[in-house]
Amino acid sequence: MNKPNYRDIARLAGVGTATVERVLNGRGGVRPELVEKVIIAARTLEYPRTLPETHRGLLRIEVLMVRPETTFYRRLSHAFQRIAATLDPLVVVHRSFTEEMNPEEIARRIVSSDVPRAGLILAVPSHPVISAAVEKVNAQGLPVVHVVTRASDRAGEFIGIDNFAAGRTAALFISRMARRTGPFVAICHPVYQVHRDRIRGFSDYFREHPGPSSFEWLGFGGDEERSSTDRLWSALEMYPDLAGLYNAGGANSALIEVLRRHPRGRDVFFVGHELTEYTRAALRDGIMDVVLDQAPETQARRALDLILRRIGLTDIEPDRAPSHLITITREGL
């Protein structure tokens, strides 16, 4: 490949070649936000020379998440907060939340240019409107990292677990350790690609390993307590010999309460995600059997490391392998 030139950098940064020349040769007279765009574009294209500093002021990394009321996203937000406190004072990590089921608002937040940003970290659902917004800002030279779940398959880099493997892992535990023979069911939130990947892995495992018990039913709980409760009660009514439950998403606390109250609840082998105060107590009580925790703290660290690498604040390339899935049982608490 030919090495990038001023024209390539100008196209990616959305500025003229004269602006690129002034920035790269330190001639001054260019607004700070344009300096940042040019330097980030040059670094993205791996322009082969020492580049000037982008700022004498602050570098802002924006983290956009959803559902602050959930334990998982609170864990993720607190992880970004703790890590940000250890970074160079010139780096500001701004965390904010938006409405999960409003893709237009999420897209608007992604493309917003109200405040200059050096990088964008997203933990939001996938949707065509959101994907288009991600692809737009990434094409303009803004480094984008998806954490936990992908909002676009075409733009940005992903930090997270192998969710297909997570679903297969859940299926392995249920098929080998269920206390009875009978149907297995699962609940998920279909707006998240990672939930769909988990269910695909769960289903594929049983397709490849047929036996006396099988995956019979999938319910969409939307990670909402009322909806998830209704789905599980329906499954218990449909299958009097229900042997296993896999929850690929959230609302574990509601499912735990159903199994705690139901006379056959303790006969159901229950695998779910994320270690919280609810799932920890359910493991101790024998209501839940296996928790698959994706360690959001590790994902936050890797996401910030990747942004810092892309904007040239570190030369260390972050680990690209999927984050490790942590398997927790009552005996491991």
Image (cartoon, grey):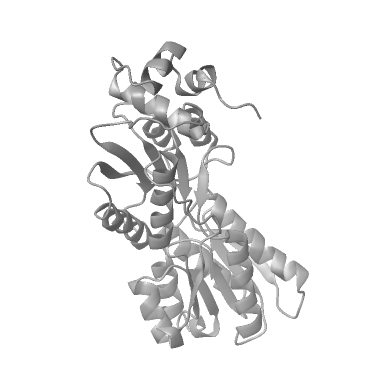
Number of callouts in the render?
0
* Displayed quadrant of residue 1: top right
Quadrant of image for the C terminus: bottom left
Name the residue rendered at 45%, 23% in the picture: 13
Residue 31 seen anywhere in this rendered image of the structure: yes
Task: Give the x, y percent position of residue 294.
Answer: 47, 65
Residue 309, compared with residue 69, is above or below; it is above
Name the residue rendered at 53%, 16% in the picture: 7
**From the viewer's perspective, is 111 left or right of 155?**
left
Residue 22, compared with residue 236, is above or below; it is above
Name the residue rendered at 55%, 80% in the picture: 269
Residue 158, compared with residue 263, is above or below; it is above
Task: Give the x, y percent position of residue 234.
Answer: 54, 67
**From the viewer's perspective, is 195 left or right of 213?**
left
Name the residue rendered at 36%, 80% in the picture: 281
Task: Give the x, y percent position of residue 169.
Answer: 61, 71
Residue 103, compared with residue 188, is above or below; it is above
Camera-side residue of 57 and 73 = 57
Task: Give the x, y percent position of residue 45.
Answer: 53, 31
Residue 123 seen anywhere in this rendered image of the structure: no
* Displayed quadrant of residue 3: top right
